Amino acid sequence: MTNRTHLRLIILYVTVGALLLVLMGRLWTMQVLEGRHYRQVAADNRTRDIVVPAVRGMILDDQGRALVRNRTALVVSADRTVLMRQKDRGRAVLTRLAGVLGTTYEDLVNKTRLCGPGIKRPCWPGSPYQPIPVDDKVDAKRALQIMERQEDFPGVTAQVQAVRDYPRPGGANAAQTLGYLQPITQEELDKRKGLKVTGYSGVDLIGRDGLEAAYDADLRGEPGFRRLLVDSQGRVTGTAQEKAATPGGNLVTSIDAGVQGAAEKAVQDAVKSARSQGKHADSGAAVVMDVQTGHVAALASYPTYDPSIWTGGISQDQYDALLGKKKGEPLISRATQGQFAPGSTFKISSVSAAVADGYDLHGTYSCPGSYDVGNRAFRNFEGESKGSMSLHEALVVSCDTVFYKFAYEEWLRDGGTKPKKNPADPMVKMARQWGFGKKTGIDLPSESAGRIPDRAWKTAYWDATKKADCKAAKDGYPDLERSDPSRAAYLKAVAAENCAEGYVWRAGDAANFSVGQGDVLSTPLQLTRAYAALANGGRLVVPRIARAVVRADGTVVRRVPDPPAAKLPVDPKVLKYVRGGLDGVTKSGTAAGAFGGFDFKTVDVAGKTGTAEVYGKDDTSWFASFAPVDNPRYAVVVMISQGGQGANAAAPAVRQIYEAMYGLGKGGKPMVGKDGRLPSELPRPEAAIDPEPGPSAGPPAGPSAGPSGTPSPGPSTPGGAGDPSGAAIPTVGPSLQSGAAGRRPGTGVTP
């Protein structure tokens, strides 16, 4: 052997040895350092994870009646990701699916496209990686047809799911209060790390409004999962691991279905009545609240809508109708989000401010037909003069000029158009003490704050609108001038005044403020809270709807505490005096006609009418009340936009609500107990899912053995869809992504 040959052998040995060392090192790395990772990869190739949805909790009224519950439905879903990976981007699959479901290919394409700018509904607003429901009303025959031919429908699943149902006990709709569910977005899904969602389920829906949103964490529960063993062809061979879902809690509320239904009917009747009298009544609201606790018994809004419209997707026309002015924007709650001038119902605050500012509570005041505020005459309703009277009588007959006098004199003491350094503005400050101009704190999202205008607000508003006002002052309103010259001239004059001195807090601003007009805005809920404080002796309670979260067996998970009530800085003697004045309104005052023949012996009602003028529209009708007068328990407020006088539209509606609550009239059954109260004990809830049998794919079969003899996965609990404990809903066929096989002849496997 030559030296050269020997050298070559050494190089070969070294090379082979080095390669062996590299191979051994790589094997050691894969098996030791990265062993866990590759074991997981191997496991993923032979397992499929299924999310077991948690049954969402119900929303119950104060007696345990379901305002929102669940019903079982067969839901067909399509996995967009799987469809897009196919050569024809899923066209053939969707065409076949459309034939089975009795719809069109175009309809399914629209339902599975992603929502975005310029995309009309129907579209999918959730995560692009989530299976998209395309039909939640499919029958069992069609569902089985899909699942038994999985080779023709890759990426398509059919499952029995729990979907929201609205039984409307007592006629209660409460759509704006209850809220609705919508699919989870990708951004929200990214925050839920560690959860592999491989099937359409309740996990994917979250509350978007109302109680569904405010208490979403309590209602949604915790999803479980099921890890299935599959073979190389995706067929299920057994169950590797399983974790049961934890059902969501049931939310017990203070809403009483009977009172809610009565309030909704009263508002609807008031709107119809106002329209029959030639008014343009377009919306309304009613609030019923316990004055001692702040618990809300009813929160009605008109116009309203059927909340089941969200179940199974919503069309563009339906979505536009919810938000469009043509249908009255029914998605908006007029009770908590609607802002309106409160009119004379606001005088409870103005009386308190005047007395605190030094005016005699028991004094005598003149009520002329008009009162000069600066160089302008401010008139009573219809210019009627009523002579001299007490503040009690001023409330009973709703004399505006008494309050104009208070406001004007206070404005002058503050320096008029050249205010002193720290003006007192007693009426503005008192209104804020009554809770106006800020949110009440009710446990609902998107509450409006109303508006209490002051000098700072006037300046800020002028800064924001000066440019437009100055342009209008110069150019006028040429389009309006052709059809309504007088109105165009008036608006031009107003624009000129606002352009020059729109930042000035004028005498007219103060006068309008005193009677709840001008730029003052309140929500019906804010006014109800103020009247509750008047009735209970000065505690500004925080409105609450939720009372507790309970399990299906009645076990209390947690109670929703009542926030502490603020103290109203008004002398109790003043509050008592005002209550006495409002007591006379329903007997001999502005609401006497509306309450003629009312059974005051059963329930004595006190209240205040309000008729708020709105330029270019009919008046806003208000009636705010509390009862019983001697021992107040409930405050009831009704507002009818463009309903006319408070005594003609809102007051009769309030009467109708009290009559329903106390069972007045022929054949009436009282909703309150002998103690005059609605139920206060926590009820035992009904079943979490509608006990009536939902659609199914046939009678349940016992577990069948797979090839290895392992029982195939079935429902995780014996209760199935009808289990009132909130057990997971069994699936019809596998809840798997593409590649999973349904039952095929000869396999002996029931997935």
Image (cartoon, rainbow, N blue to C red):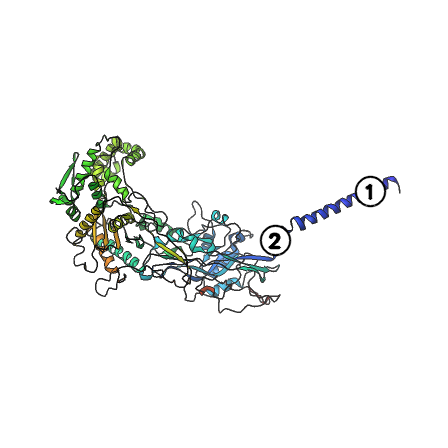
Dot 2 or dot 1: first in sequence order is 1
Left or right, 252 with respect to 8, comes to left
Residue situated in front as seen by the camera: 413 or 729: 413
Residue, far left: 387
Residue, far right: 1
Disc 2 marks a residue whose amino acid type is: Gln
Q: Which secondary structure, mark 2?
A: helix
Provide residue 598's location: percent of width, then percent of height.
18, 58
Residue situated in front as seen by the camera: 432 or 293: 293
Provide residue 116's location: percent of width, then percent of height.
44, 46
Residue under label 2, please give it: 40
Residue under label 1, please give it: 10
Left or right, 76 with respect to 467, comes to right
Q: Quadrant of the N terminus?
A: top right
> Is 335 situated above or below 226?
above
Q: Quadrant of the C terminus?
A: bottom right
The number of discs equals 2
Q: Is residue 487 visible?
A: yes
User: Residue 570 is drawn in which quadrant?
Assistant: top left
User: Residue 680 is drawn in which quadrant?
Assistant: bottom left
Provide residue 381's location: percent of width, then percent of height.
16, 45
Q: Which residue occupies 17% across, 40% down? A: 359
Residue situated in front as seen by the camera: 445 or 320: 445
